[in-house]
Each structure stands twice: as C-alpha cells, then as structure tokens.
Amino acid sequence: MLPSSKHSLSAKTNFRRIWEGIVLTSLMFCATVSVFVTAAIIFVLVSESVVGIGDSLAFFQEVSLWSFLTDTAWAPQYGEGQFGILPLLAGTLWVTGIASVIGLPVGLASAVYLSEYASPKTRGIIKPLLEVLAGIPTVVYGFFALFFVTPLLIKPFAENVLGIEANIFNAMSGGIVVGIMIIPMVTSLSEDVIRAVPRGLREAGYALGSTRFDVSTKIVVPAALSGILASFLLAISRALGETMVVMIAVGAQPKLTWNPFETMCTMTANIASMANGDAGTGSVEYRSIYAVAFTLFIITMGMNIFSQFILNRYREVYH
C-alpha cells in the first residue's frame, strides 16, 4: 500500500472515531437532560407538597394526609378550605374508565383489521386518516364534545332512554371524546407489535386448518400480548393526563358521584383552573396544585412500573 493511501485511511479512521465520540457525547447529554428534568420536576412537587423550602410550609404540613385522602369535598377557596382528593380522583377515574372502554377495544380491533385483513390499498387510506385524527388539537375535541356529543348524543340518550337528566358538562361526554382521542395511539402501537409476530406462526395456523379469525384471535394477538398491553397502559396514561378536553366538556365542579351524566372535575382540570384562579402564591390553596400534581405523578409512575412488569412478564422472544 502506498504511503499516501495509508495516510488517507488513517485520516478517515481518526475522523470516524472523532465523529462517533461526538455522537456518543450528544446522546449522553440528551439522556442526562431527560434525567435532570425529571429530577427537577420531582423536586418541585415534593418541595411544595411534602417537605417545604425555607420558612414556607409545604401543603401536607398544613393539611393532613389522612384528610387529603379521605375527605369527600374539595373546596380550597371557601371558608377554611376543604382538601379532599376523592372528588377529583372520582372525576379522573370516570373519564379514564369511559375512555378506556371505548378506545382500547376499538383501537385493538382496528389494529387487527389493518394488520390481518386490510389490503395494502385500504391500509394506505386508513392509516393517514388515523394520523389526522391524532393530530387534531385537543381544544377542538373539547368543543366537539360540548357542542356535538353532549346535545346530540348524551342528552337524548340519558333523557329518553334512561329517564335521567344530563348536564351540559358531564363526564360521559368527556370520556367518550377522550376515548376517541386514544384510538390512534392504541391502533398504531398495537399494529406495530402485531405485524412483528413471525409469519411462520400464521402459516402454521393456516396449515392446521384455522380460519383467518382463528389465527388472528388465538395465535397473533396472544403472541403480541405484551406489546398490546403496553399500548393499553400508555393510552390510559394519556387519558389520565388529558386537560383541555375535560376542562371544556366535563366541567370544573368537584363532585363525588356515581352518575357520569353530572358535572365533575378531574385532577388535571383542577390544576389548570387553580393555576389561573385567584389563589395567592404561597397560600395553601396555591400549594394544593402541587399536592394534586404529586398525586397524579404517583399514579402515573405506578402505571409505568406496572407496564414494565407486564412487559417483562409476558414478553415473547422469537428466534
């Protein structure tokens, strides 16, 4: 090899090593930023709700944890204030539960259809439509729930079929629309894991005389169960954290009730309304925002830990 060729090869090798070092440093920096931001969020939530900084008292130093978890009223700005999380938790669970009942089965059925039944042409039409559905601003969904779903669907059904009155702001309408919002997420993630199932499993099922429905429901879906459950939990977390839709459609009146056709308030809607309200900075009403946010953080973190357990427990490994 000529000396000039050796020099050129050495220069390329050195450049590649320098470039790889830059990329590695950039990736480590991005990962560090993510960890730092997460730690900063946890610090703010804990310092305002649990520990306190300097002379300022934290929320749970003025309000007992027991009353926060067991009181049935949330009225921080009236009288001495009532800080029971149960009404906010009930509204959140109502909206999330209704959204899950609608979004999860519809999203999974859509994913199975796109993966196992739809032709490439049909898939090429439906997939972009789902992406458009996912790109609609949440405020548009909120007004869609308020001016279409509630007056044209919820109120006639509640009054004519069930014989009860439905409020213009209600958890049922918000839950339905949030369920529609999470359909594209469930469909996209579930379809990816379903299509990743080895084709040999499908061919083995067909060789034994199974129909396409049998192969889809008894072979493909169970084989992709871990990924499907992960998409479910991610969609539920998305429903838990939704703010704009529930503020517009569900309302901002904390109420502990079993009737989903009444006005309620979710934890995220309460945080947004309190932040824009008249609560003075440093007051117990203001710090209640962080207490509710910390509770929501604990719930979401618990769901993430549970999703990791599900992934590790039911993960399928193919060779």
Image (cartoon, rainbow, N blue to C red):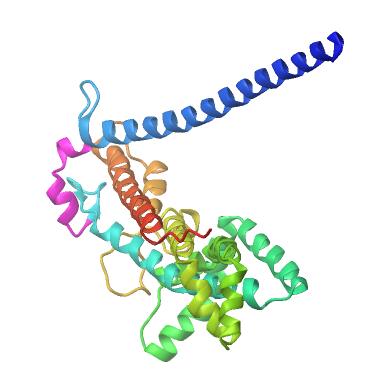
> Who's the residue at 22% across and 35% down the image?
50
Q: Is residue 133 above or below residue 164?
A: above
Image position, residue 227 (x, y; %): 48, 61
> Who's the residue at 53% across and 64% down the image?
186
| Main secondary structure along the magenta-highlighted residues | helix
As rendered, which of 239 and 186 lies closer to the eye?
186
Residue 65 sits inside the magenta stretch: yes
Question: Residue extending furthest top?
Answer: 3
Q: Decide if residue 135 is on the left or right side of residue 306.
A: right
As rendered, which of 287 and 229 lies closer to the eye?
229
Q: The N terminus appears in which quarter of the rendering? A: top right
Residue 152 sits inside the magenta stretch: no
Which residues, given as a range, are shown in magenta? 58-73
As rendered, which of 68 and 16 lies closer to the eye?
16
* Quadrant of res 233: bottom left
Image position, residue 149 (x, y; %): 53, 74
Question: Residue extending furthest front?
Answer: 1
Looking at the image, how many numbered discs can be counted on the residues? 0
Image position, residue 109 (x, y; %): 55, 75
* Quadrant of res 303: bottom left
Q: Decide if residue 236 is on the left or right side of residue 69.
A: right
> Who's the residue at 43% across and 73% down the image?
101
> Who's the residue at 17% across and 45% down the image?
80
Q: Is residue 121 above or below residue 26?
A: below
Image position, residue 37 (x, y; %): 44, 31
